[in-house]
Image (cartoon, rainbow, N blue to C red):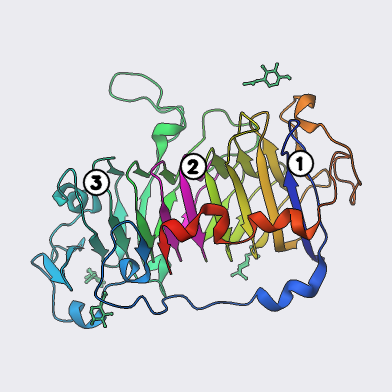
């Protein structure tokens, strides 16, 4: 399998879909290495307007010998989910239900290993929830379900893509680590109604660290808000990262399971003044291919890949305009068979998208 190390950028910043490409080359290999998270985190001061490493961690010593009874750790409430019945809840939803509405401080829901077959919903009234598994054994704790868009609800109405999510989060300051979120529905090319979301994040200011998202078509609905995906693994076939959010995907692994057709990102941006877009940085793209890098789901869709390691899984065209030629305005260099509206970008132009400043991290991430 031919491997390419490419850095490029697709950004339709003013006149409709206007993808741009940069090939910055291998000088960036040096920074692509693993950065071990879980750094300092620091003092006793708690700032609930920020997400810190402490919000993604439960002390192991606290867990030892502790199996039931809701606890406190450094003043932070911890709820233990154990499907075998030795925790505070046997289901994840049961633990979410224990968090009060209008919650004002961090609550850590610690999920012990197991396969949790359930749908989970976190309402907007419950901010500051952490879902914590073991970040070194992400596949040991799985939340899984199998709704698809054509399924009917109890009133006989089709669910539609949005309502298929195995886990759906409407609240702000959510974070998760060490968990696999899954929707087991597989979509073959041409199948109708098999969109099946593993996780939908609609709340603002969310962080995902060492989390896996597994699905087929429409795996991750990165719906609305500002989000940080760090060292995550996202797998799917068609439009498997999609939505209207402003998100940074850093050091992620993006795996295509497509057979004959597929697309990684389908970003939705309808106005040139929207500050949204998906930025993939220092990530690995691999799998069975062949997929498009992105489809323009909206007149001003914005998807950026920089410093990524891309295996040979991308269809020659690279991008798709969703059958609306107005989304591909702009002219530029053709790169290895890509659509001719792809274009070179300078380092200065790509710079606003490549780190946490892009998601205004200084305002809500204390890492
Ligand atoms: C709890 O507080 C101690 C002492 O300040 C600190 O070392 C530890 O990291 C904290 N644990 C968590 C999970 O916040
Ligand atoms: C739950 O029970 C199963 C079967 O006895 C066991 O393998 C597993 O380790 C248990 N899980 C936890 C979290 O204790
Ligand atoms: C994709 O890359 C990741 C990280 O290197 C690796 O663990 C995984 O096995 C790869 N998957 C495929 C299908 O190549
Ligand atoms: C997108 O662009 C097309 C063609 O220019 C236009 O007809 C359509 O109204 C636009 N859609 C939106 C939502 O602005």
Q: Is residue 256 visible?
A: no
Q: Is residue 224 magenta?
A: yes
Image-based side of 334 in relation to 353, left or right: right
Residue 167 placement (x, y as % from top left)? 36, 46
In the depicted structure, whether residue 40 falls above or below residue 177: below
- Name the secondary structure under disc 2: strand
Mark 1–mark 2 distance (CA, rounded to whole Å): 20 Å
Residue that badge 1 annotates: 319
Residue 217 placement (x, y as % from top left)? 56, 41
Do residues under tags 3 and 1 come within 8 Å of each other at their CB atoms? no
Do residues under tags 3 and 2 come within 8 Å of each other at their CB atoms? no
Residue that badge 2 annotates: 221
In the depicted structure, whether residue 21 falls above or below residue 82: above
Q: Nearer the viewer, residue 42 or 297?
A: 42
Mark 3–mark 2 distance (CA, rounded to whole Å): 20 Å
State yes or no: Cβ of the residue under disc 2 lies below 8 Å from any atom of ligand 4: no
Q: Which of labels 3 and 2 is toward the front?
A: 3
**Residue pictured at 47% horizontal, 48% vertical:** 226
Q: Name which quarter of the figure residue 242 lies in.
A: top right
Q: Name which quarter of the figure residue 2 lies in.
A: bottom right
Q: Which residues are magenta?
A: 202-230
Q: Is residue 349 visible?
A: yes
Residue that badge 3 annotates: 126
In the depicted structure, whether residue 157 falls above or below residue 269: above
């Amino acid at each position: 399998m031919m491997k390419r190390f490419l850095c490029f950028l697709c950004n339709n910043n003013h006149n409709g879909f206007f993808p741009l490409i940069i090939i910055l080359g291998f000088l960036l290999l040096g920074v692509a290495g693993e950065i071990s998270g879980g750094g300092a985190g620091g003092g006793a001061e708690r700032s609930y307007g920020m997400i810190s490493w402490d919000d993604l961690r439960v002390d192991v010593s606290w867990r030892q010998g502790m199996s039931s009874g809701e606890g406190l750790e450094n003043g932070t409430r911890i709820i233990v989910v154990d499907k075998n019945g030795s925790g505070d809840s046997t289901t994840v939803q049961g633990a979410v239900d224990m968090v009060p509405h209008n919650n004002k401080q961090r609550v850590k829901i610690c999920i012990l290993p197991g396969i949790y077959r359930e749908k989970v919903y976190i309402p907007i009234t419950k901010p500051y929830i952490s879902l914590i598994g073991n970040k070194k054994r992400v596949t040991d704790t799985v939340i899984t379900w199998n709704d698809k868009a054509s399924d009917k609800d109890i009133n006989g109405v089709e669910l539609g893509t949005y309502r298929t999510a195995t886990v759906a989060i409407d609240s702000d300051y959510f974070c998760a680590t060490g968990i696999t979120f899954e929707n087991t529905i597989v979509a073959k090319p041409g199948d109708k109604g098999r969109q099946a979301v593993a996780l939908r994040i609609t709340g603002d200011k969310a962080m995902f660290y060492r989390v896996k998202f597994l699905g087929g078509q429409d795996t991750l609905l990165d719906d609305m808000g500002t989000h940080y995906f760090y060292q995550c693994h996202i797998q799917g076939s068609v439009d498997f990262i999609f939505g209207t959010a402003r998100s940074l995907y850093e050091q992620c692994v993006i795996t295509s399971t497509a057979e004959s057709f597929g697309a990684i990102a389908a970003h939705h941006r309808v106005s040139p003044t929207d500050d949204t877009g998906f930025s993939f940085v220092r990530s690995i793209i691999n799998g069975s291919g062949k997929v498009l890098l992105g489809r323009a789901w909206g007149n001003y869709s914005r998807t950026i890949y920089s410093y990524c390691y891309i295996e040979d899984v991308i269809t020659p065209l690279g991008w798709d305009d969703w059958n609306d030629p107005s989304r591909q305005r702009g002219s530029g260099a053709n790169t290895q068979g890509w659509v001719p509206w792809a274009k070179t970008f300078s380092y200065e132009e790509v710079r606003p998208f490549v780190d946490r400043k892009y998601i205004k991290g200084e305002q809500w991430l204390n890492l």
